[in-house]
Amino acid sequence: MIRFAFTLALAAPLAGCATVPQAAALHPEAMPYSEGRDAMADVDAALARAKQRNTHLLLVMGANWCHDSRALAGWLASPRFQAMVTERYEMVFVDAGKPQEKQGRNLDVARRFGIDELPGTPNLFVIRSDGTLVNGESVTGWRNAASRSEDAIYNELLALASG
């Protein structure tokens, strides 16, 4: 009986590990967040392009270490999303570091659009070409991106593009 309980105690954590690859397969992943870029210059250039094209800026502040950031970036890189994003947005990925551990990066970009604190990653900003934030109430609510459905993310971005 003791041997059975011991085996069960060892098997439970391993069963959790076995589900990790399956969970990762539920969404694509990408790692576009680069520490070395001039984030503010990238945002300025994208806003200029958005103004020329009469579109919005889709600014994603995340990090390559974060599975939710990688999942959101993966969806945005998929063919379905690329068609919509290319038509309706200029997109920029900005490395945010680890803001929840007070090791954030490029937080001046978030503050530029009225978001003073990032509680984690990713954060998704939809910004009109004149620099006004469309989705202030939902910017920091994307930390569960890996568990959102493809359709839910797509439909939300489609609706925000009209805002």
Image (cartoon, rainbow, N blue to C red):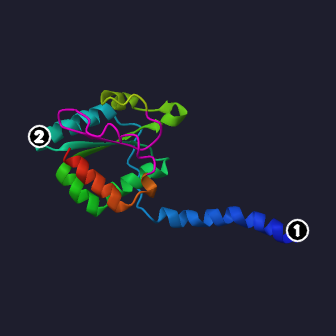
Q: Earlier in the sequence, mark 2 or mark 1?
A: 1
- Which numbered dot is residue 2? 1
Name which residue type carries label 2.
Gln
Q: Position of residue 44 (x, y in %)?
A: 23, 33
- Quadrant where the image shows the C terminus: top left
Q: Is residue 150 magenta?
A: no
Q: Position of residue 100 (x, y in %)?
A: 51, 36
Say which of marks 2 and 1 sits in front.
Answer: 1
Q: Position of residue 43 (x, y in %)?
A: 27, 36
Instruction: Give the residues drawn in magenta, as a range.
Output: 118-144
Q: Nearer the viewer, residue 30 or 55?
A: 55
- Quadrant where the image shows the N terminus: bottom right
Name which residue type carries label 1.
Ile
Whether residue 142 is situated above or below residue 78 in the rendered picture: above
Q: Tell me the residue at 28%/36% (across/down).
A: 42
Q: Tell me the residue at 70%/64% (across/down).
A: 12
Splitting the image into 4 quarters, where does residue 9 fall? bottom right
Q: Tell me the residue at 39%/32% (across/down).
A: 106
Q: Position of residue 68 (x, y in %)?
A: 45, 51
Splitting the image into 4 quarters, where does residue 71 fall? bottom left
Q: Which residue is mark 2?
A: 52
Q: Tell me the residue at 39%/28% (across/down).
A: 116
Outermost residue, right direction?
2
Check disc 1: other Cα within 10 Å, few if <14, some if 14-19, many if 20+.
few
- Which numbered dot is residue 47? none
Indicate the secondary structure of the residue bearing disc 2: helix
Check disc 2: other Cα within 10 Å, few if <14, some if 14-19, many if 20+.
few
Q: Nearer the viewer, residue 51 or 156?
A: 156
Q: Nearer the viewer, residue 127 or 49?
A: 127
Whether residue 29 is situated above or below residue 128 in the rendered picture: below
Whether residue 87 is situated above or below residue 41 in the rendered picture: below
Cα distance in 3D space between marks 2 and 1 = 71 Å
